[in-house]
Image (cartoon, rainbow, N blue to C red):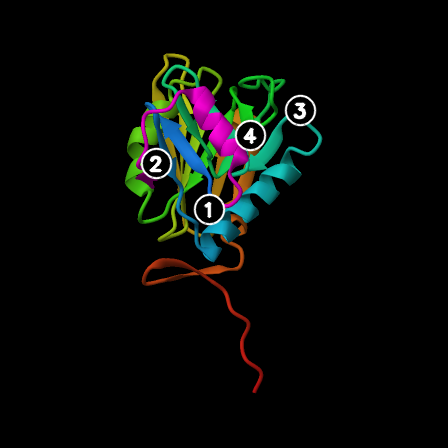
């Protein structure tokens, strides 16, 4: 992401611009808009796979699963962002009466890419920890079958649980479901640069 060259904006000005934008989505922090780069096909497949599995597992409960179309506001820090997957289990709270910015996610998941991994692990996770509603934060690797889940403890500390390998399963305690790692990476393989989409074999 890169900051757009412009004067500092208020959150209200950002939302006005963002809602009018057609082709580009931008995050907002400290008066600046940051254009988001597009993801790869394999990256999108992993997001779709995990969102599907969560949706199936949570179908009969109160939790709602959305992907990167849902904007999240971290009120205490002023960050507006588009996580790869957002799960809201309590009645949703919205930023300004419009239903496009949620304030109370229970679970957030980011699928890592080479250009955003440091941002997702560092700055972004630090911002997300300010969300009082957030119980878990998941990071899904793009270079190997591995899912890291950070869980908020009663003390306020965050405890890491890791599921690695295609035979592993990962447990999302915040929404009371277990998902097989192989289902998260369905239809992708691992190449030198991480995930690549499976291609059908040519007929001979």
- Indicate whether residue 182 is drawn in magenta: no
Task: Please state the horizontal and vertical placement of residue 192, each as a whole percent of the image.
Answer: 32, 63
The foreground one among 96 and 71 is: 96
Q: Residue at x 63, y 18 (%)?
A: 91
Helix, strand or loop at mark 1: loop
User: Any mark on residue 62, and which?
Assistant: 3
Tell me the CA gap for discs 3 and 1.
Answer: 27 Å
Q: State the residue position of label 2.
A: 120
Q: In the picture provided, is 194 more to the left or to the right than 100?
A: left
Does the rendering let one see residue 172? no
Measured Cα–Cα span from mark 3 to mark 4: 10 Å
Looking at the image, can residue 192 be seen?
yes
Marks 3/2: CA distance?
27 Å
Q: Position of residue 66 (x, y in %)?
A: 58, 35
Q: Any mark on residue 168, and which?
A: 1
**Residue bearing the label numbered 4:** 87
Cα distance in 3D space between marks 1 and 4: 22 Å
Query: Image quadrant for the C terminus?
Result: bottom right
Magenta residues (range):
1-23
Q: Which mark is residue 198?
A: none
């Amino acid at each position: 992401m890169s900051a757009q060259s412009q004067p500092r904006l208020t959150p209200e000005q950002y939302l006005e611009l963002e809602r009018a934008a057609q082709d580009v989505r931008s995050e907002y922090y400290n008066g600046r808009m940051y254009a988001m780069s597009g993801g790869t096909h394999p990256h999108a497949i992993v997001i779709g796979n995990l969102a599907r599995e969560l949706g199936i597992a949570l179908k009969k409960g109160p939790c709602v699963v959305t992907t990167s179309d849902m904007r999240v506001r971290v009120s205490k820090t002023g960050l507006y962002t588009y996580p790869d997957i957002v799960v809201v289990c309590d009645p949703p709270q919205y930023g300004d009466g419009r239903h496009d910015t949620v304030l109370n996610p229970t679970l957030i998941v980011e699928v890592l890419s080479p250009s955003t991994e440091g941002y997702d692990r560092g700055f972004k996770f630090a911002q997300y920890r300010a969300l009082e509603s957030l119980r878990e934060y998941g990071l899904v690797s793009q270079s190997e079958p591995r899912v890291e889940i950070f869980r908020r403890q009663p003390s306020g500390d965050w405890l890491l649980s890791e599921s690695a390998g295609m035979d592993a399963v990962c447990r999302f305690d915040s929404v009371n479901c277990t998902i097989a790692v192989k289902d998260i990476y369905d239809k992708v393989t691992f190449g030198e640069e991480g995930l690549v989409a499976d291609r059908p074999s040519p007929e001979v």
